[in-house]
């Protein structure tokens, strides 16, 4: 059987077991099989991998591996109601504890409802491990960050403790799974006189390495000077109406005196510079300035 499996691997191609060593484009959480007294499978772990370490979405490709199998194992079959078809795992080479996946084009079923689905690994009819696989609905965004801060300061990873009424602010949202063709989003809040548009390739994009791999939307606005002190919600709807993301900010203190707005701060993104703010260092990514028609 082992020789047959190896021939199948050669014909279909492999997803190498280097995935277990951190070479995977993304690794998702997995669960060990249920521990039972006298059960040799208790130490076996079933792991799944997603592209670029992103959330797994219906229709996405997915890869699996196992570790902790007994020496001499030859084949493991992975099944789940969330998978289009069973996935076969074999040793990288005879006697190896490392697993390789037969074939490289395995996918989660399209049209699945968002939820957590069971996954079972069996070897010659015996269950050796189980896991739970979290699947998001198709077209779901993955909001990496949504922040608001003073327009003349580098936006950090968290919303600032407070802003004063009448402040000039910058807004930044990063989506790791932005919809194709969605170049602008609208932010609404009682803090603003009117909805605020944030765009891709905006001069307000701070160029932070923390946003690499995502689509960055940025823009600027001025808070209303007459808003009472309190905690306020900002809301942005993305993915053509399918996803809503909220952020909160506290407004305290006297209104900022009227004056020229310094909201557009493109120069912050000087290539390769490092900016230290509030004890935290932020490395700015190099990026060529591009002009693009706004959506």
Image: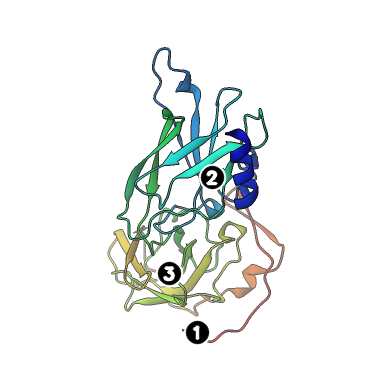
Determine the residue located farthest toward the right in the rendered image: 272
Mark with earlier residue (3, 1): 3
* Figure quadrant of the N terminus: top right
Provide residue 79's location: percent of width, then percent of height.
Answer: 41, 42
Q: In this view, does 223 lie to the left or right of 227?
A: right
- Report how far apart the C-alphas of labels 1 and 2 lie in the structure: 36 Å
Q: Is residue 200 left or right of residue 8?
A: left
Query: Is 276 located above or below residue 187 in the figure?
Result: above
Query: Which color scheme does this rendered protein use?
Result: rainbow
Query: Is 225 located above or below residue 66 in the figure?
Result: below
The numbered dot on residue 294 is 1
Mark with earlier residue (1, 2): 2
Crowdedness near tag 1: few (<14), some (14–19) or many (≥20) residues, C-alpha within 10 Å: few
Q: State the residue position of label 3.
A: 167
Crowdedness near tag 3: few (<14), some (14–19) or many (≥20) residues, C-alpha within 10 Å: many
Q: Nearer the viewer, mark 1 or mark 2?
A: 2
Q: State the residue position of label 2.
A: 27
Mark with earlier residue (2, 3): 2
- Report how far apart the C-alphas of labels 2 and 3 lie in the structure: 41 Å
């Amino acid at each position: 059987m082992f020789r047959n499996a190896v021939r199948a691997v050669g014909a279909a191609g492999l997803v190498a077991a280097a995935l277990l060593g951190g070479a995977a484009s993304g690794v998702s959480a997995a669960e060990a099989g249920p521990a039972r007294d006298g059960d040799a499978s208790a130490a076996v772990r079933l792991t799944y991998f997603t592209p670029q370490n992103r959330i797994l979405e219906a229709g996405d490709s997915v890869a699996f591996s196992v570790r902790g199998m007994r020496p001499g194992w030859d084949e493991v079959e992975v099944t789940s109601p969330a998978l289009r078809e069973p996935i076969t795992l074999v040793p990288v080479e005879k006697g190896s504890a490392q697993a390789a996946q037969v074939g490289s084009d395995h996918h989660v079923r399209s049209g699945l409802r968002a939820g957590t689905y069971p996954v079972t690994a069996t070897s010659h009819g015996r269950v050796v491990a189980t896991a739970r696989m979290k699947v998001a609905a198709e077209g779901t965004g993955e909001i990496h960050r949504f922040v608001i801060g003073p327009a003349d300061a580098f936006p950090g990873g968290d919303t600032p403790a407070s802003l004063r009424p009448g402040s000039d602010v910058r807004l930044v949202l990063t989506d790791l799974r932005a919809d194709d063709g969605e170049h602008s989003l609208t932010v609404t809040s009682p803090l603003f006189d009117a909805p605020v548009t944030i765009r891709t390739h905006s001069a307000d994009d701070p160029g932070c390495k923390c946003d690499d791999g995502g689509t960055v939307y940025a823009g600027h606005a001025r808070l209303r000077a007459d808003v009472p002190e309190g905690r306020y919600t900002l809301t942005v709807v993305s993915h053509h109406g399918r996803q809503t993301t909220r952020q909160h900010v506290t407004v305290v203190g006297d209104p900022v005196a009227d004056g020229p707005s310094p909201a557009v701060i493109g120069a912050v993104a000087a290539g390769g510079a490092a900016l230290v703010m509030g004890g935290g260092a932020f490395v700015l990514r190099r990026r060529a300035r591009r002009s693009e028609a706004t959506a």
